[in-house]
Amino acid sequence: MKNLKNYLAVAVAISGFQLANAQDNSDTNIASHILNVDVPEVALLDIFDANTNTEAAAILFDMSEATVTGINSEAGLYAFQALSYTDLYLNYTSVVASATNTDGYDLSRKINVQFETGSTFPGNLDLRIIPEAPLLITDGGTVDSGGTVVSGGVALGKTVPVGTDALLVDSIESVYTGDENQGVKLTYTLEQNGNFAAYNAGSYQSTLIYTLTDL
């Protein structure tokens, strides 16, 4: 019986201790707790082709259209300007920091473009890539956070050699452009750059690489 009394006394003591620790006896009409939110950096990019309603794939410039068909079939001329391709859109999402920080988060991003190393392209010719100011979905960003396009675009080929980056869009902050016909609209044109003697017949293949920097 003595052992049973001792057991009950210990059990009551433990129960009382647990109850005392479960209550702080300081409740008011206000309660609170901490909620942490971790926002990672984001850098996502794709190219939408509104001509096919798909992500951009192979694009063909048939140079016969510059000299041997239709209104360009004229001896003594070569109409590079007759060829162009438009309605390509750079869609992108970027999340950056708003101020200098110790976490290594970027404050802004850029979009660069290049002909990938190993690409081939006709001599003394440029592919001119002309960007338009970003078209953003409602509340996806501001005029400033969407970035600034390079005026007049960039010229890849003779001007910017294969394997070399060219800046296309600068000062991108936190933004999401929207999908498909949103973001930076691109137009491709061809420009002679140098003596026509270096422009030779053949099949050429280039890969265009667009990069949203994640420094």
Image: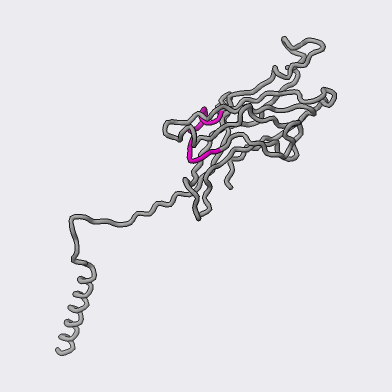
Which residue is depicted at the point 42% across and 34% down? Answer: 139
- Based on the picture, tell me whether residue 188 belongs to the magenta stretch: no
Which quadrant would residue 5 be assigned to in this image? Answer: bottom left
Which colouring convention does the figure follow? one colour
Which residue is depicted at the point 54% across and 41% down? Answer: 44
Outermost right residue: 197
- The percent coordinates of residue 101 (x first, y second) are 49, 52
Which residue is depicted at the point 74% across and 31% down? Answer: 159
- Based on the picture, tell me whether residue 173 belongs to the magenta stretch: yes
Which residue is depicted at the point 61% across and 23% down? Answer: 86
Quadrant where the N terminus sits is: bottom left
Question: In the picture provided, is 150 more to the left or to the right than 9?
Answer: right
- The percent coordinates of residue 178 (x first, y second) are 48, 33
Residue range highlighted in magenta = 171-184
Tell me if residue 173 comes above or below residue 85 in the rendering: below
Outermost bottom residue: 2
Numbered marks: total: 0
Magenta stretch prevailing secondary structure: loop
Nearest the eye: 1 or 182: 182
Tell me if residue 100 comes above or below residue 23 in the rendering: above
Nearest the eye: 1 or 206: 206
- The percent coordinates of residue 33 (x first, y second) are 30, 57
Outermost front residue: 100
Tell me if residue 80 comes above or below residue 205 in the rendering: above
- The percent coordinates of residue 181 (x first, y second) are 52, 27
Which quadrant would residue 76 be assigned to in this image? Answer: top right
